[in-house]
Every structure is written in structure tokens, then in C-alpha cells.
Image (cartoon, grey):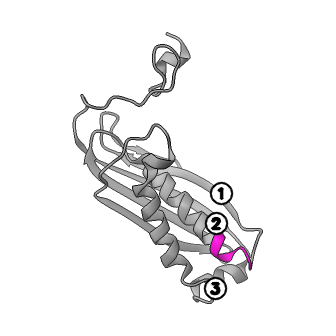
């Protein structure tokens, strides 16, 4: 078996293809993704103290992340459009220069929600950057990754910290 035939999004002719999930069982599925945003301590203090001139950074980033998860299939070409039952986006200050963004997506369905969670944290991080770039163009988005997934045939997976 060639490497291409083992990839789920490649058909027998080597062409990109959307996976057929019609025979999969509907199960409760959860995915959690996380990203870090490193910035100047003054920038993070302004965000937390709601002193950014463009408005409430975290509230805006939360809404942007939720919207992005809901539109994931429009952004990632081979993703299935999903009826998400929950999208949550949370923020945690982990150091004077580090904001952690975490998104959780849930549904009961035939395909996982990993891409939706990853899209949510990515767009939330980009929104923070956009709203604060006048203060700190050196912000760094890093460590964007899946940290948990459950449901489906493959069961539960947890990232190593």
C-alpha cells in the first residue's frame, strides 16, 4: 500500500477527496486546542485592564474564535460542515508576557471537531494580535496545538505536556 492510499483525504488516484463519513456511527465528540501569545508585559497588562484603544480585546477575540469554529468548513477545503453543539474560548494569563488561549468544541456526529478547535484558537490569537499590533508588533503566536480529543472510533487522545 502506497503512502498516498493510506491518507484519508487522498483517493485511489492520488487526488484530494473529502472523506465519506456516512457509514460512521454518531458519537459525542470533543476537541480542545490551545495556543500561546507572547507579548510585552505592558501589552498584556493593557489587555487585562481593558485599556486597549480598539476595545475589549478578550471579548472580541472570544467571539472571533467562536465564529471561526462555526465557519471552519469554509476555510479548510476538505472539512465537513458541522452542527457544533458548543464552542468555548477561554483565556489565561500564565506569565506577565504570556496569554494562553484554549478552545473547546463539541458535537454529536460522524466526524471529529479537531479542526474547529484549532481554527478557533488561531483566529482568537490573530484577533488579539490585530487589536494590539499598534502597541506591540513583536507579539508571537506559538504552540498552537490539539491537546485533547475524544469520541469516534479512535477514542480519546491527550497531548503530552
| Left or right placement of residue 141 versus residue 102 in this view | right
Look at discs 3 and 2 and give the one toward the viewer: 3
Decide which of tag 1 and tag 2 comes sooner along the chain: 2
Quick one: SS at disc 2?
strand
Decide which of tag 3 and tag 2 comes sooner along the chain: 2
Magenta stretch: give its range.
130-134
- Which one is nearer the viewer's eye here, 89 or 96? 89
On the image, the x and y values in percent for residue 91 come to 50, 72
Say which mark, if any, is on residue 122.
none
Q: Is residue 43 above or below residue 94?
A: below
Residue 151 on the magenta segment: no
Kindly report the distance in space between the C-alpha atoms of the residues bearing marks 1 and 3. 22 Å
Q: Which residue was labeled with disc 3? A: 52
Q: Which residue was labeled with disc 1? A: 142
Q: Is residue 161 visible in this depiction of the protein?
A: no
Q: Badge 3, how many Cα within 10 Å: few under 14, some, many 20+?
A: some
Q: Quadrant of residue 151?
A: top left
On the image, the x and y values in percent for residue 40 come to 74, 76
On the image, the x and y values in percent for residue 88 come to 39, 65
Q: Is residue 84 above or below residue 57?
A: above
Image point (69%, 80%), residue name: 43
Q: Badge 2, how many Cα within 10 Å: few under 14, some, many 20+?
A: many
Q: Quadrant of residue 25?
A: top left
Quick one: SS at disc 3?
loop
Q: Which residue was labeled with disc 2? A: 37
Residue 133 on the magenta segment: yes
Quick one: SS at disc 1?
strand
Kindly report the distance in space between the C-alpha atoms of the residues bearing marks 3 and 2. 16 Å
Image point (72%, 83%), residue name: 42
Amino acid at each position: 500500500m502506497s503512502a498516498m492510499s493510506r491518507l484519508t483525504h487522498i483517493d485511489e488516484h492520488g487526488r484530494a477527496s473529502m472523506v465519506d463519513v456516512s457509514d460512521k456511527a454518531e458519537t459525542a465528540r470533543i476537541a480542545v486546542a490551545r495556543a500561546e501569545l507572547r507579548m510585552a508585559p505592558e501589552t498584556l497588562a493593557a489587555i487585562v485592564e481593558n485599556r486597549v484603544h480598539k476595545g475589549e480585546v478578550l471579548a472580541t477575540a472570544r467571539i472571533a474564535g467562536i465564529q471561526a469554529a462555526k465557519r471552519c468548513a469554509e476555510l479548510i477545503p476538505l472539512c465537513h460542515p458541522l452542527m457544533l453543539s458548543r464552542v468555548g474560548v477561554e483565556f489565561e494569563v500564565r506569565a506577565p508576557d504570556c496569554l494562553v488561549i484554549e478552545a473547546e468544541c463539541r458535537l454529536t456526529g460522524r466526524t471529529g471537531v479537531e479542526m474547529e478547535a484549532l481554527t478557533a484558537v488561531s483566529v482568537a490569537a490573530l484577533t488579539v494580535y490585530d487589536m494590539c499590533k499598534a502597541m506591540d508588533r513583536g507579539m508571537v503566536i506559538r504552540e498552537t496545538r490539539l491537546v485533547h480529543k475524544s469520541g469516534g472510533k479512535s477514542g480519546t487522545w491527550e497531548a503530552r505536556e
